[in-house]
Image (cartoon, rainbow, N blue to C red):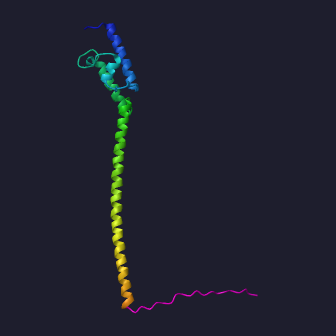
Amino acid sequence: MRISAAQRTENENRIRAAMDRLLRGEIPPGGKCDIKTLAREAVVDRTAFYGTRPYAHLRVEFDRRLQALQQAGEIPDPREAQIARLKAEVTTMKERLSRSESTIDALAEFRTQALARLAAQHEEIVQLRAAADGTNPITRLPSARTTTITIGSCS
């Protein structure tokens, strides 16, 4: 079915208006920032955007503007923005978990080494005490006495 030039202009205006709404982030419920939603919002057949169809140049313009927004760091579709944010958060959490696990492993190894050293030192102390008690004549020195010196006043 052929459309008149006036109908085609009206359709292009509706498509451009819908394109502007989608790129501003005004995504309808159940839609995305894509050609399918653009066609639905403009009330135009989606196939008119492909190949040599009448609105293929508008699809190219839509894709170009969408890419420009994405390269500028803006994501018009709130769901896509949330997905990107959550993916980045998952990556950060995985890196944090990996660092935590390596820290835990290092601390567990340190604990094992510290306990082994303490056990070896305790064993050495027990052996030294046993050797000191029986065979070696060790004389214990008397404890140091504290002497109090009083200084009188000079007159």
Instruction: Judge by depth and name the residue closer to the eye, 75 or 121.
Output: 121
Q: Quadrant of residue 134?
A: bottom left
Instruction: Judge by depth and name the residue closer to the eye, 148 or 115.
Output: 115
Residue at image coords 33%, 47%:
94
Residue 40 vs 152, above or below: the answer is above
- The answer to if 142 sits in the magenta stretch is yes
Can residue 140 be seen at all in this image of the molecule?
Answer: yes
* Furthest-right residue in this view: 155
Q: Quadrant of residue 74?
A: top left
Task: Give how far across and how far down residue 98 sits, in percent.
Answer: 33, 52
Question: Which residues are drawn in magenta?
Answer: 136-155
The answer to whether residue 131 is left or right of residue 50 is right
Task: Give how far across and how far down residue 82 sits, in percent.
Answer: 37, 35
Q: Quadrant of residue 70?
A: top left
- The answer to if 63 sits in the magenta stretch is no
Task: Give how far across and how far down residue 61 sits, in percent.
Answer: 32, 22
Task: Give how far across and how far down residue 155 sits, in percent.
Answer: 76, 87
Q: Give the position of the N terminus as an image quadrant.
A: top left
Query: Total of numbered circles in the picture?
Result: 0
Residue at image coords 36%, 87%:
131
Residue at image coords 36%, 32%:
79
Residue 10 vs 20, above or below: the answer is above
